Image (cartoon, grey):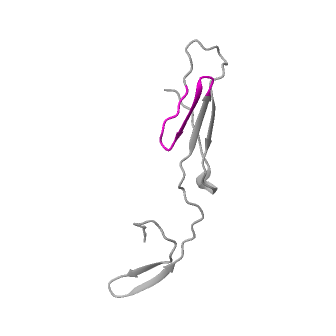
Amino acid sequence: MESKLGDPFDHDPLTQICEDGVYYGCVQIVVRVMDVNDNYPIASVNTPYGTSTGSGNTDTSASVPENSDVGSYVAHISVIDADTGPSGQVNSHLFCS
């Protein structure tokens, strides 16, 4: 059995009624919300040419001049999330395009 909330949860106890056509049963469900994932991660990219910041699904990028020396500083990237617990943990990936 699966139950889904259609509206924002208001922390009142839920009652689930189950029936098979002849018999029925009720159970009260208490949900304890430990964390709400309500904050987007915020990424900041600091380069020698400036800083860009993005949140949510916003792309944040850094460009490197074509004539840069090997080993040149490109960027410092930081990502933070104001949520606590597992919802506040972030993973970042670098890729070339």
Which residue is at the front of the view, 54 or 21? 54
Coordinates of residue 94 in the picture (x, y in percent): 57, 33
Look at the picture and state if 22 lies above or below 44: below
Look at the picture and state if 87 lies above or below 32: above
The residue most toward the left is: 21
Which residue is at the front of the view, 9 or 21? 9
In the figure, residue 74 lies in which quadrant? Answer: top right
Q: Which residues are magenta?
A: 47-62
Quarter in which the N terminus is drawn: bottom left
Q: Residue at x 57, y 66 (%)?
A: 33
Indicate yes or no whether the magenta region holds residue 40: no
Q: Is residue 43 left or right of residue 58?
A: right
Which residue is at the front of the view, 21 or 37? 37
The residue most toward the front is: 50
Q: Is residue 87 left or right of residue 28?
A: right
Q: Residue at x 52, y 72 (%)?
A: 11
In the figure, residue 71 lies in which quadrant? Answer: top right
Coordinates of residue 38 in the picture (x, y in percent): 53, 55
Q: Residue at x 41, y 81 (%)?
A: 17
Indicate yes or no whether the magenta region holds residue 52: yes
Q: Residue at x 54, y 23 (%)?
A: 63
Coordinates of residue 54 in the picture (x, y in percent): 53, 38
Q: Is residue 6 left or right of residue 69?
A: left
Label total for image = 0
In the figure, residue 73 lies in which quadrant? Answer: top right
Coordinates of residue 89 in the picture (x, y in percent): 62, 49
The residue most toward the top is: 67
